[in-house]
Amino acid sequence: MKADAARIIVQGFLKGVFDVFDAMLSRHFEHKTVEIVEITLAQMEELIGRCPAVFQGRVKSGEGAALLLFSEADAVRIAGIMQGKESELPTLDNATLTILQELAGAALGGAVTNLRELVGKSAEPLNNVHAAVFDASGATALMDLVGPKPTAALFSFDAGEDFSGEGALVYSASLEQWVPESVLKGGVPEARKASTLTPDEVSDILRGFTGPGETPFAGAPGAVEQPRNLDMVLDIRLEATARLGRVEMPIAEILNLGPGSIIEVGHLVDEPVELLINGKLIARGDVVVVDEKFGLRITEIISTRARIESLH
């Protein structure tokens, strides 16, 4: 483990994760890194014993993988907050994991996006994103996923309202190659430290777990599998639209439009742009330029309940 690179990776990764938690759970999460160490199989087994709820994903290019581990009680409460039913989700079963699956894709996607921007690399999505429950027998499969000599960052978090807990980030040693010498020597620029990033959640949520030729996600005898009926719909493609604004116009004005005409769409410069999936509002964000192309940086995610109701 390269200590300096590890600190930067953990900083960028956890900030991306908890930015997404803030947006999707409508609560502010404070987090603190407790310890960063290189772990062995035995230590992974111990981690799973304390935090059996695992979010896992692999970087699309194959450069590495990352895991987020939470205690059963924390994972159940997080799922309850997402549904507005904290007291009605008593166990970490398949129904709860289905709820957590959406958060897993968004949180890991946001983490990688934030980390890559932090170190100056182009953003790239994760694939094989999965939420599952593991016991000690699954430690070998998870170690195989992240590769030899992975790094673990133990962290604590506080979300107010008597909700605090702990967790762990485990990532492949190969990800430390993302941190260039310029960042290692000069540190992270202040502008990047202070920036608030939210991921392109939609592409991660709608991405299938495993595409043609990809290695399946880690499995284990102690894992609770995702219901297969959900897998069947995750590859369905939906139309994503960024809406700058809208205005009603009489037919006469529309017929008079020509090159050079200007239409006021009732949208202020500092107002967020709406992101719609199949015509349904799911998020808002700011327009950014990435590699000379327009993009949308998500700043607000519509609540899970509101999104489900919009589909009716």
Image: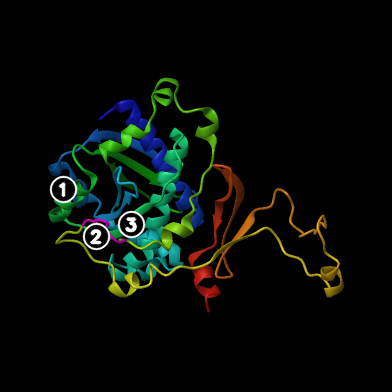
Amino acid beneath label 3: Val
Q: In the image, is 157 to the left or to the right of 268?
A: left
Counting from the top left corner in percent of width and height, residue 190 is at 53, 28
| Among the 4 quarters of the image, the one containing residue 244 | bottom right
> What's the residue type where badge 2 is placed?
Val
Neighbor class of circle 3 (other Cα within 10 Å; few <14, some 14-19, many 20+) is many
Location of mark 1 (residue)? 45
What segment is highlighted magenta in the picture?
211-218
- The amino acid sitting under disc 1 is Glu
Where does label 2 land, which residue? 133
Residues marked 2 and 3 touching at CB (< 8 Å): no
Q: Nearer the viewer, residue 92 or 106?
A: 106
* Disc 3 target residue: 129
Q: Residues within 10 Å of mark 1 (few under 14, many from 20)?
A: many
Q: Is residue 122 above or below residue 238?
A: above
Q: CA distance from mark 1 to mark 3?
A: 21 Å
